[in-house]
Amino acid sequence: MIDIGYFALCLALLASGYGVIASAVGARRGQLGLVRSGENAVIATCALLTMAVVALWQALIFHDFQVEYVAENSNRSMPLFYLVTALWGGQNGSLLFWGWILSLYSASVVALYRQRYRELMPYVVATLAFTSFFFCIVHLFAADPFQQLSFTPPDGRGLNPILQHPVMAIHPPLLYLGMVGMVVPFAFAIAALLSGKLDTTWLRASRRWTLIPWTFLGFGLLLGGKWAYVELGWGGYWAWDPVENSSLMPWLVATAFLHSIMIQERKGMLKVWNLALAILTYELCIFGTFMTRSGIISSVHAFAQSNIGPFFATFLIFSLVFSFGLLWLRLPLLKADNRLESFASRETAFLLNNWVLLGMLFAVFWGTVFPLVSEAFTGEQITVGAPFFNQVNIPIGLVLLLLTGAGPLFAWRRTSNESLRKNFTTPVTAGLIFVGILFALGLRDLYALLSFGLCAFVTIALGTEFHHGTRARMRSTSENYPMALYRLCAKSRRRYGGYLTHLALVLLFVGFTGKAFTQEFEFVLEKGTSRQVGNYQLSFESLAFAEASNHSTTAAALGLHRDGEFLGTLLPERRYYPAFDQGTTEVSIYSTLREDFYVILVGSAADHSAKFKVYINPLINFVWLGSIVFVLGALWAMWPTPRDRRLARVDRASAVGLLVPRKRPHHA
Amino acid sequence: MRRHKFTLGSIVIAAGLLYLFVASVQQSTATHLTLQNLIIKSPGDSQRIQLGGGTVVPGSIEWDQYHSRPEFTITDGEHTLKVRYTGNAVLPDTFKDKALVVLEGEYHQTNNTFTADVVFAKCPSKYEGQSYDGHVQAMNDGNS
């Protein structure tokens, strides 16, 4: 089976290489047969990589420890579920997984667009196939997942218990689906540049293909945060670690892209900018993969030093030079059809949104690569910590939050002073009143006041948008309020799905702002005693020791009261897994929408007294709530509408006569 | 005219961002050094150091009675350094014998010790820090 896997990789290399050449030559010469053959090569690459993945899964599940990867990342005691997920547990396997997802995306594009976007497709296929070709080189020559040992060890090393958690099984695939998927908009951008078909066709094709990975990536990031919060026991969910940053960066640029697409569709402006954003998103995905896997920046997440660094660096430089060089050559064809007409317009709001997102990107990028930059200039690696990222990103983030609500209040082209006044009065008043109330209640933190005020402003601004739209619809139809609201949102999914993600951002910011009020306690309690912790009373009732099949545990039972009312029993644990010589902290959380009471059992002494660490995290559940709303909004926005289906039919019909396949007998 | 206004606006925004960067960078930096370089350069007591490239010497971790605030020794195979942890956070679960650690804090040259208030630990078994031979070796060590 292993040999079949390796052989499939070799064939995938050939197939993808052939796909590049056939598509490029076919497009240049206008030979449909070659173009189709290139598309089939992409499908074949996908099938071959699927075989390779199945082969590795087979080796993992049936414990073929002669395969180095299997020996290093699994063992006999692991349940089937984690054997399956071990495919992406280590460097070489996860790269194969990367390449496989890439081929799945590529094959989907080919299968869906057999009759659409015909002028672009050959170049799209060539770009996708080239990326696959590169990954096959990496699989075969730098990170071979099928590398065999000269002997067969009796058992493998296995997976660290910290990572044996269901979230860890889905968090990496979500991130990969996000990072890898950005190759599709990139391929369409390159196709537009190569073919010279620089109207909005490529954008129309790219929007949904950006929305899908963007949703995966965003959800993956938030889920990673949730896991860190529940499992790692440091009370937080985001640490500005280089690896976290490297997946945040493409997400920021993709967000900017999703917004500026609309300006080009509406106004024919920002053509160069949009192409640049699509390219940049992709390059950042490659850069992130390079950074986390080459060991050039030390990170808690990073994989070990390995020899894939030079491969990725070469690919990164080549694709950067090629894409931006091509963009430069095409500049004369990319003149804007319109100019900005007024400051007070939707266009300006979008433009500002782009600036802010890119500013944030630059801040994160700068902080992440600062050690390398400083080493190049001073010979010393200077690292910047989380305070830098927070300090820079909080003000930028607040401006972004403002735009989330203000943007939709501006009209396209220009907004009259009167309608400005009309649209802004209620939300601004609401925001100010809310700030006033919070101030009166004793809140003095400037950023928190600003953030909460803006959250109120945005909520009311967006609420008004929904409300006005619904009322207008009720006037023209006989529908009742809920029905009109539903129909309104269903009719312009893009718009109202977008607003829903804006509301998600509000929820996230409420959660982020709560961070400013985190309280931290550390104390020792004797068994049978209790103490005041914040507004809570915590009583230490008992301490128990137990042995489970693969670990031993020490657990404390704590009674939690507030104002005399019993809230629940908390059971923080310390576990020890002897097979891995690994201790784990199992935190216990009493969770309400208002705040989390988060307890860690630090350790216990011989006299049965124990040390605890408590975090009171206000509003943190708004982060998780925001994550859910984010996904719902994104799904709402990307769901195909009847108009999309109509457009697809039109595209197919207009493709007749362009590059229509004649009926011909199938070649095997 | 309008074009100029937009350009001016962009410049103001860019300048604001740049100021934000420069002001913030100065406040939260540390110099990254390996154990080897730390001993060669021996920076002053007040300089904030991020120390990488050391692993925890097996058996060197001494916890207090509540399994917190440990003292331990790190090594790069050549040099060793005694470390005292003074931070508030609970140490990550990955912190244990042989773990690859990144520390932040100050170096005290006079008695060759390091006071760390931040400890990151990488677990070699997941992050592929050791080869398979290393694993076999570790298994044998554990058995003997």
Image (cartoon, coloured by chain):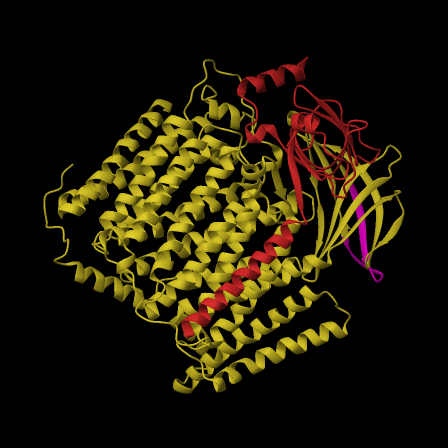
Chain colours: A yellow, B red
**What residue appears at the point 48 percent right and 15 percent down from the top-left corner?**
A152
**Residue A164 visible, this orientation:** no
Question: Is A429 in front, or is B111?
Answer: B111
Residue B52: horizontal and vertical position, in percent?
64, 32
Q: Is residue A654 left or right of residue A235?
A: left
Q: Quadrant of residue A196?
A: bottom left
Identify the main secondary structure in magenta: strand
Q: Is residue A455 left or right of residue A196?
A: right
Q: Relative to A535, is B127 above or below?
A: above
Question: Is B2 in front, or is A129?
Answer: B2
Decide whether residue A263 is among the magenta residues.
Answer: no
Decide whether residue A563 is among the magenta residues.
Answer: yes
Quarter of the image where the C terminus of chain B is located? top right
Quarter of the image where the N terminus of chain B is located? bottom left
**What residue appears at the point 39 percent right and 84 percent down from the top-left corner?**
A477
**What residue appears at the point 50 percent right and 23 percent down from the top-left corner?**
A71
Q: Quadrant of residue A590?
A: bottom right
**Residue A508 visible, this orientation:** yes
Q: Relative to A202, is B109 above or below?
A: above
Question: Is A39 in front, or is B28?
Answer: B28
Q: How many marks?
A: 0
Q: Which residues are magenta?
A: A556-568
Question: Is B142 in front, or is A550?
Answer: B142
**What residue appears at the point 42 percent right and 36 percent down from the top-left corner?**
A313
Residue A504: horizontal and vertical position, in percent?
54, 63
Residue B134: horizontal and vertical position, in percent?
58, 19
Residue A507: horizontal and vertical position, in percent?
59, 63
